[in-house]
Image (cartoon, rainbow, N blue to C red):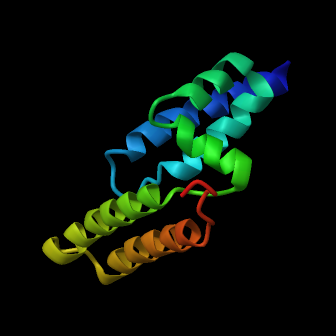
Amino acid sequence: MIQRSLFLACGLACVAAAAAGLFLPLLPTTPFLLLAGACFARSSKRLHSWLLSHRLFGPILADWQAHGAIRLRVKVVATLLASAMVAYPILFRDLPPELAAAAALSVLLVLVFLWTRPLPPSS
């Protein structure tokens, strides 16, 4: 019972982080969605079904669960948004070089993960 509650709380927190990641720089949406799906699969069939049938998040999760894949459109949009979000503060704000390097490296690592995932068969 406690384990189920922890998975449920983690899933809800991950959905909130994924939603925030749509608008906040350096906060990736897809990994949080994948984690939320895994947590809900272990804690709440209703929330897992809701997430899979969600207009925006559902296809991303379905592709991942079926094929471990990410759609090309998702990769391109994520790359453009992440690049823009990290480029703005690096180019137009007075960031310490260590902070700029850490931000650029974190985005680079997320993009490497993203682009090394296969495309779904329907793409």
Given residues 101 and 22, the one toward you in this image is 22
In the picture as drawn, the residue positioned furthest to the front comes out as 122
Where 67 sits versus 94, above or below? above
Where 24 sits versus 111, above or below? above
Where 94 sits versus 49, above or below? below
Find residue 56 and report its horizontal and vertical position in percent.
Answer: 45, 36
In the picture as drawn, the residue positioned furthest to the left comes out as 92
Find residue 72 and report its horizontal and vertical position in percent.
Answer: 47, 61
Where 59 sits versus 51, above or below? below
Q: Residue at x 51, y 28 (%)?
A: 54
Q: Name the quadrant of the N terminus.
A: top right
Q: Residue at x 79, y 30 (%)?
A: 42
Total numbered badges shown on the rendered structure? 0
Find residue 55 and report its horizontal and vertical position in percent.
Answer: 46, 30
Find residue 89 and report its horizontal and vertical position in percent.
Answer: 22, 68
79 to the left or right of 33: left
Q: Name the quadrant of the C terminus.
A: bottom right
11 to the left or right of 98: right
Q: Quadrant of residue 67?
A: bottom right
29 to the left or right of 11: left
Q: Residue at x 70, y 29 (%)?
A: 40
24 to the left or right of 117: left
Q: Residue at x 53, y 50 (%)?
A: 30
